[in-house]
Amino acid sequence: MEDKLISEDVRNSLKKAFTRLTDTVTIEVYTQEGMNDSFNEAAEIFMKAISQLTDRIKVNFYKTGDKAAGQRDVKRSPTILIDPDKCKIRFTGSPAGEEAAAFIMTLLMASTGRTYLSDDSRKRLDRLREKRLVRVFVSPTCPYCPQQVIYAVSAAIEKKELISVEIIEIYENPDLAEKYGAMSVPTTFLGEELMAAGLQPEDSFIESVVEGKKVEYVMPVGREEMRDYDIVVVGGGPAGLTAAIYGERSGLKCIVLEKANVGGQISVTPVVENYPGFAQIAGKTLVDLMAKQTLEYSALLQGVGVSDVTNKDGILEVSTGRGTYRTRALIIATGAYSRKLNIPGEDRLAGRGVGYCATCDGYLFKDGKDVIVAGGGNSALTDALYLDSLGAHVTIVHRRNAFRAEDRLQQSVFQRNIPVEWDSIVEEITGEKKVEKVSVRNKKTGKKKSLSAQGVFVAIGYEPNNSIAKKLDLELDNEGYIRVDAQMRTSMPSVYAAGDITGGIKQIVTAVSQGATAALTVFEDIASPYWKKAL
Ligand code: NAP
């Protein structure tokens, strides 16, 4: 059974990772028969397996009725406490899938006392005087969750006396999800109050914990020091990562600044089937491979959002919550964000059944729940197939009588008999505290119908993330995408763009190609600036 849970390869990498453990970490696992039995078993097997890989991890097993449970205030099953005599880190639910990686990181941080946080974040935390309880709802399939968990756990390790953290597996604890109104992941609460829906940049997360409320924009911590680069790449999707690989290989000093975590849209694409070399690969796995390769060459920071860019006589200054980066060239690879339906109920029920990331939140609907997918492109059909494979009852609502998606995806949808409401639009989403119904209107007949639904996934395309381009007053097309030439130069010397932010065909192969082109053009332009030649 343990062998099934942890493959030989994973066992070997864990053994290697555990050689970095310094102090012994004690894990307490609490279970109760009859409550989440299959998850109790998974937690017990996983904890036993990792404790057998090193003598620096000790695991003690208890029942929730034991005296120890009373002393630690444990009532839920399974509950896992990390070094409870030293810090306050609790996993309510069995850490599986994406969460298993965050759990292993937690053990490493608890043992070494060294966290992921930057010096700036530590300085911010020094302002904290009051106690804080941070609750993060997560799911095993959510690629954004581990990063938010790592910030939370890091904060609890940095400020052991003041910060307690509870990581809650949403699927195993539906009553807690209901109580807090959490229906998407990651969702973070400070005590009982909502702090953030979605992954935050590191500085916003820490500042929110210190301030006791959501803080969106964060000023640098009074540090004037500049860091100099040849290329600053903004955005850590395939285009940005490839640009950094090509830039460094050309001898240029590069850094990638990613405001959330690496990957962009592919990290939430369940399966990629059209990237040459991989017949079928999970989007997250593909981007993890790209990020690993990038790190062999270039600096890459996650959780670092860019607040401003200025151009002072050809030297660009990129401001972030971690300080300012001075660069000879900027490559904008900021991609795009999900378009909204803009209909009644969409905003009010966002995170309460309305979602834009089926990979993250689809797990909640896996037991035959009714789910609507709006859209007819590649994203909508990929999401519908993923949700169907989880066991949800999916209906696609598409505004025309033919899909835009590629033929392979269409054939799969038809083979699986996923119902489609053709020529129809979702007009309203209703429900008191969470999604209960959607109102769908057929555009041809004018007929309306009400469909029962617990989830609505909106997959109707993207809008460009063009705030930096606007700050620099770059030329944009009618839809707001950055205009580039064939070398990926924008309308401003020293500023380049690559990937989805340039519009056009939005594929991983085109993004990596544009990233490479942009970096190689920077190399050429630094050696021989075209804007000087033109003078
Ligand atoms: P998309 O290709 O732009 O398709 C958007 C879909 O939503 C279209 O079917 C469109 O209908 C519909 N739509 C747009 N606005 C709407 C509105 N206000 N109300 C109702 N329906 C609306 O977007 P996408 O599927 O998100 O894909 C984005 C890009 O990523 C594309 O270039 C796509 O090829 C790429 N992608 C590729 C893959 C893959 O290769 N496997 C996977 C995912 C995404 P109409 O058809 O009537 O315009």
Image: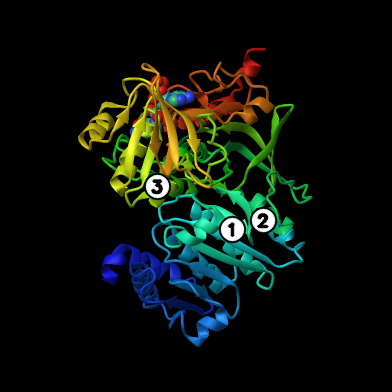
Location of residue 437 with respect to 182 vertically, above or below: above
- Please indicate whether residue 455 sits to the left or right of residue 229 in the image: left
Q: Residue at x 63, y 12 (%)?
A: 534
Give, as a three-letter code, the residue at label 2.
Ile
Work out which quarter of the rendered image holds the C terminus and state it.
top right
Disc 2 Cβ-to-ligand 1 distance below 8 Å: no
Residue that badge 3 annotates: 362
Viewer-side residue, 183 vs 132: 183
Answer whether labels 3 and 2 touch (C-beta < 8 Å). Answer: no
**Residue at the outermost top position:** 535
* Residue 1 image point, x, y percent: 26, 71
* Residue 47 image point, x, y percent: 39, 74
* Residue 183 image point, x, y percent: 49, 50
Q: Residue at x 38, y 33 (%)?
A: 380
Answer whether labels 1 and 2 touch (C-beta < 8 Å). Answer: yes
Location of residue 474 with respect to 351 vertically, above or below: above
